[in-house]
Image (cartoon, rainbow, N blue to C red):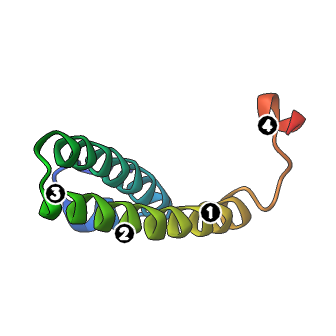
Amino acid sequence: MTVNPFDLKSALLAKHAQHVVLVHFSIALFISSFVFDLLAIRTGSRSLAKAAYYNLIGAAITALAAVSTGVLAWQLQLEGESFRGICAYI
């Protein structure tokens, strides 16, 4: 069964989709926080500094959610199987 990439409901409600979405969302919030911070330093704007701060808070919250959904996906889909490859040494 293939998933239509334009069918948003089936793409977001797939068993693995929540972790993948949250990982990229937290990375995007962190990058936008960095950009807002650079712009705030360059222009001296307090509102850009606030935007950077709130984006960083959002990135931290979504990173925690990404970790929890990653562990949940690991337990449910891989049945807690030990990692192979590079992760085996960590």
Q: Are marks 3 and 2 in contact (CB under 8 Å)?
A: no
Determine which residue is flagged by label 4.
87
Q: Residue at x 16, y 52 (%)?
A: 6
First-in-chain label (4 vs 3): 3
Q: Secondary structure at mark 4?
A: helix
> Of all residues shown, which one is farthest toward the front?
44
Which mark identifies residue 73?
1
Q: Secondary structure at mark 3?
A: helix
Determine which residue is flagged by label 3.
48
Determine which residue is flagged by label 2.
13
Q: Which amino acid, mark 2?
A: Leu
Q: Which amino acid, mark 3?
A: Leu
Horizontal arrangement in the rendering, residue 56 relative to residue 19 (left or right): left
Q: Residue at x 51, y 70 (%)?
A: 65
Q: Secondary structure at mark 1?
A: helix
Q: Nearer the viewer, residue 53 or 8?
A: 53
First-in-chain label (3 vs 2): 2
Q: Residue at x 38, y 49 (%)?
A: 24
Mark 1 → mark 2, Cα distance in angstroms: 13 Å
Which of the two discs, 4 and 2, sits closer to the camera? 4
To which quarter of the image does residue 76 belong? bottom right
